[in-house]
Amino acid sequence: MSGENVYNRIAVLRVERGVSRRQLAEALGVHYQTIGYLERGEYSPSLHLALRIAEYFEVPVEVVFSTTPFPRIGSAEKSS
């Protein structure tokens, strides 16, 4: 099973936008616990659900999901 992890930024996007797990779940038509499982990496979404989540947040799917861990927020920040 290692090597098949799907990492995500769902929790970060939810907090940035002030959306609860329950609100996101209702918008996507899934149980609110599913959002928790996704955020903790205990469940990998179907392609359809992944695309719907990205669409909900109005970002490309690769902003939400990755096969490699996302860098921690605040690490190696570049100043522009």
Image (cartoon, helix red, strand yellow):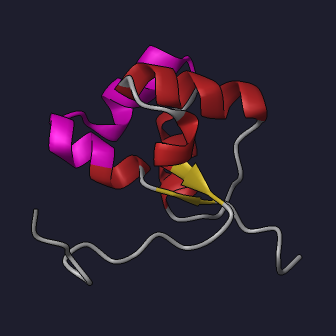
Q: Is residue 43 left or right of residue 7?
A: right
Q: Is residue 29 above or below residue 79?
A: above
Is most of the magenta stretch helix, strand or loop? helix
Per the rendered image, the range of residues in magenta is 13-29
Residue 54 or residue 20, whichever sits in front? 54
Would residue 56 be found to the left or right of residue 65 on screen? left
Q: Residue at (19%, 73%) from the top-left corner?
A: 78
Rendered location of residue 23, percent (x, y): 32, 25
Horizontal side of 16 relative to 3 (left or right) equals left
Q: What is the quadrant of the C terminus in the image?
A: bottom left
Rendered-image quadrant of the N terminus: bottom right
Tell me, yes or no, whether the highlighted magenta stretch contains residue 28: yes
Residue at point 71% right, 52% down?
Answer: 44
Please give the name of the residue rendered at 36% of the width and 32% of the height, measured from the top-left corner. Answer: 22
Is residue 14 shown left or right of residue 61?
A: left
Between 19 and 59, the one nearer to me in the picture:
59
In the rendered view, would you say 74 is above or below 48? Answer: below
Nearer the observer, 19 or 56: 56
